[in-house]
Image (cartoon, rainbow, N blue to C red):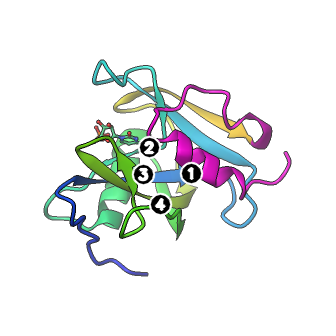
Amino acid sequence: MDLSPHLPSSGRALVVAAAVVDDLRTPTRLLAARRTGPSVLAGGWELPGGKVELDETPLEALHRELREELGVVVEVGPPVDGPLPGRSWLLGERYEMLVWLAVVVEGEPAAIEDHDEVRWLGAGHLFDVAWLPADLPIVERLEARFGAS
Ligand code: C5P
């Protein structure tokens, strides 16, 4: 697996997130997490993740964020490619985000930090929550991977 940093050339800061699913090959459920802040994003649902720190690779950041925010250890699967160079997704003006599929290998996802609720969405219910605007096209891209539930 490639652990080298994927630094954006755009000047935007890099964020990483996971599409946590029940099965990497044939997912039937996707994990959504509801943000508690900042106020403009609070109440919005996202793919869990966060900013990459200077001293870590994107995948190290992904593992750290999922451990801190949800209390889980994950196995990371294939990337969910975005339209930007480097296959990232645009998050407003200031950030761009790399996304991977992931499955939980240890722990049960819980809203420990930065969220107040986590929810598993079945294949026919991927849009039952109010996704953050930046995450919506990513979930639309993910939908094609889901089988009927
Ligand atoms: O989670 P954190 O605050 O570190 O993420 C940085 C920014 O990335 C957030 O302010 C939010 O705008 C954006 N973000 C997002 N969707 C995600 C994760 C982060 O839009 N799934």
Q: CA distance from mark 3 to mark 2?
A: 5 Å
Instruction: Give the residue number, with chain letter if any, for mark 3.
Output: 17
Depth check, mark 3 against mark 4: the one in front is 4
Given the image, on which type of amino acid does mark 4 rest?
Gly
Label 1: few (<14), some or many (≥20) within 10 Å?
many
Depth check, mark 4 against mark 1: the one in front is 4
**Marked residue nearer the N-terminal end (4 or 2):** 2
Given the image, on which type of amino acid does mark 1 rest?
Val
Question: Residue 37, position in %: x, y?
Answer: 31, 24
Image disc number at residue 20? 1
Instruction: Give the residue number, with chain letter if any, for mark 4.
Output: 82
Q: Is mark 4 within 8 Å of ligand 1?
A: no
Depth check, mark 4 against mark 2: the one in front is 4
Name the side, left or right, on which 96 lies relative to 146.
left
Which quadrant of the render holds ligand 1? top left
Do labels 1 and 2 touch, CB within 8 Å?
A: yes
Of residues 148 and 104, the one drawn nearer to the viewer in this rendering: 148
User: Which element carries disc 4, helix, strand or loop?
Assistant: loop
User: Which element carries disc 2, helix, strand or loop?
Assistant: loop
Question: Residue 129, position in %: x, y?
Answer: 60, 27
